[in-house]
Image (spheres, coloured by chain):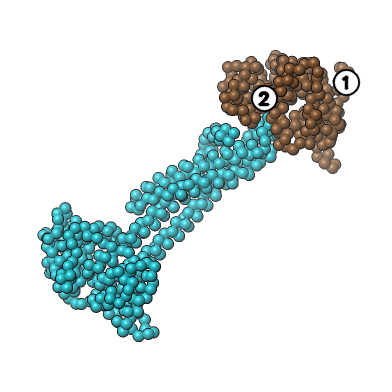
Chain colours: A brown, B cyan
Amino acid sequence: MNESAATITKPTPLLIELRGVTKIYGSGAAAMSALRGIDLHIDQGDFVAIMGPSGSGKSTCMNILGCLDTPTDGDFFFEGVEVGRMNRDKRALLRRHYLGFVFQGYNLLNRTSALENVELPLIYRGVPRAARRARAQAALAAVGLAGWENHTPGELSGGQQQRVAIARAIVTEPRVLLADEPTGNLDTARSREVMELITTFNREHDLTVLMVTHEPEMAAYAKRQVHFLDGLIVPGPNQGGDA
Amino acid sequence: MLWETVQLAQREIRRNVLRSSLTILGIVIGVAAVIALVTLGRGATLQVTEQIASLGSNLLQVRPGQGFHGPGGASASADPFRSEDAEALSREIPGIRAVAPVTSRSTQAIYGNLNWSTSVTGSTNDYLTARDWPLQSGRSFSDSELRAGSAVCLLGATVKKELFGNMDPLGASIRLEKLSCQVVGVLQAKGQSSFGSDQDDFILIPLRTMQRRIAGNNDVSSIFISARDRATIDKTKEDINKLLRERRHITAGQEDNFNVRDMQEIMATLTGTTKILTTLLGAVAAVSLLVGGIGIMNIMLVSVTERTREIGIRLAIGALGSEVLLQFLVEAVVLSTFGGVVGIILGLSGAALAARALAMPFVLSPQIVVVAFLFSAAVGVIFGYFPARQAARLDPIEALRHE
């Protein structure tokens, strides 16, 4: 997409900025505060591990960063543009053009071949069939699944499925990869493969990565860690606060 | 993009062939019923129309007696007509093309050792004019034959076939009761009348021959009149009425003792009945289309629920709500139009078989096929919209969490 941004390595321009972001679910007496004022800066090319116990607000924050949800209050700038108050369709277009998603449960279309799964985001971008096919094949090759194009998710191992999901996320050359516990369903060996793959894309393609994880071993692949607790960003347990 | 969506829809539909087939069954039955009924209805209408044409153009029939099919039927007391009545009509009424006084009775026609039960009609050449009935071979009666009451006859196609087979009857003599008469012409085949009788089972002889040699009186049992112009036929009927009342000495206030029937009017009533029946049956069939549509809506709702996760994935990677809506709408429309096409094929084949069984014409109407197709597509749009909107409005976060 943005070739110049991909080649710049020295300066690290600000890509994402959260300012005083809050999220309240429900209203009145039943209101529940999931985020209680988050400030977060993420530079182009960063690799951030988002950690914290269940209910700490990290998933909510991830949903807002992924433009799947909107903040109740506060500002969310993406490349300097306020996107937190965009309507549903504009956020969908933002996801389509700038974001890639990897989920814990892979979330591939069943009964649909690996190749077609990877082609899916390109269909919504209106890429013509032949180009789509070529790019999807290249993405599958990049995650080490050349030759597995016609297998359906049911015929692939968990690690392979997650690699298909990564191929689907990066086939559009997004600015940000949002990974929600990408290794949560995998054994250690597969987890490492997946993490190494993500690290490679981060380093070689200057892909900004935001990853939620429980496992310190996986978080260690990131350039830095952000810890959530009770809806706030707190200094990490084993290092100084760096957020 | 739309073509991609159609292909995707086809794939989704093929994934569950049994369910898809059952879903479209309602549409198939509805469309097939509409198509079959309308096609058969058109065939019936065409049949009646053809029969109207075979009667003769602008044909009026005058009979003695009050009203036809009135209480007690044609009253026996009403005097028959005379040849002079017919002559007066043709002389004094301007709107008339041909007037044919007619007397008929059933009789045996004998040729050699062959014997055929038929009806013999005494009239003039005007009878053929009034009924638009051309000769196939030979000639019609000459003026002198008509005046003298000569023993000559014209044969209908059925009589010719029964008595002569493939032989040429011209010049041969057949026997009608005690009268031996010479065949001078053969009429073209006219086919069945609307009342199911064979119009070609018929022999025509000069009226005078009929009166003198067979009936033994000077009565004319009815008069066939061909009006010159359909538009002024009511005026012509009025004129006929007036003249005949005068000639039959009916004073003002007294009821007619004869009646004038407009054959085409009777036929038009029959056609109207056929059309009303077709419309009613079509409406019943349309209800089954509605039921079919509800079936599609039901299954699409189930499908949206089952595929919540898929919808979540699509929304997460950047599909617009409208694109998801289109996807499900297209799926519903592909389902329903497929049902429509199957229904059209079944309906037309059913109508063709039924038309053959009922000896009716099969009229393929392209409009009704197009209308049925569009209607089934519309059913898909209308009943697919609600489930599709449900899908489009899903929250991607919730949808991704759905098991």
Disc 2 crowd, CA 10 A, few/some/many (<14, 14-19, 20+): many
Is A168 placed above or below B377 here?
above
Q: Nearer the viewer, residue A193 or B123?
A: B123
What x and y, as percent, mark residue B129? 26, 65
Name the residue rendered at 22%, 63% in the picture: B202
Among the 4 quarters of the image, the one containing residue B90: bottom left
Name the residue rendered at 87%, 20% in the picture: A242
What x and y, as percent, mark residue A243? 86, 22
The secondary element bearing badge 2 is classed as: loop
User: Which disc, if any, is residue A172?
Assistant: 2
The secondary element bearing badge 1 is classed as: loop
Q: Quadrant of the N terminus of chain A?
A: top right
Disc 2 is attached to a residue of which chain? A
Q: Amino acid at mark 1?
A: Gly
Tell me whether circle 1 and circle 2 mark residues in contact (CB < 8 Å). Answer: no
Same chain? Circles 1 and 2: yes
Q: Is residue B276 visible?
A: yes
What x and y, as percent, mark residue B181? 13, 66
What x and y, as percent, mark residue B383? 59, 45
Q: Is residue B149 visible?
A: no
Q: Nearer the viewer, residue B282 or B94?
A: B94
Q: Amino acid at mark 2?
A: Thr
Total marks in image: 2
Name the residue rendered at 38%, 73% in the picture: B235
Is A63 placed above or below A188 here?
below
Question: In the drawing, does residue B124 fall left or right of residue A116?
Answer: left
Q: Which residue is mark 1?
A: A241
Upstream in the sequence, badge 1 or badge 2? 2
Q: Nearer the viewer, residue B204 or B233?
A: B233
Badge nearest the viewer, 1 or 2: 2
Name the residue rendered at 27%, 58% in the picture: B190
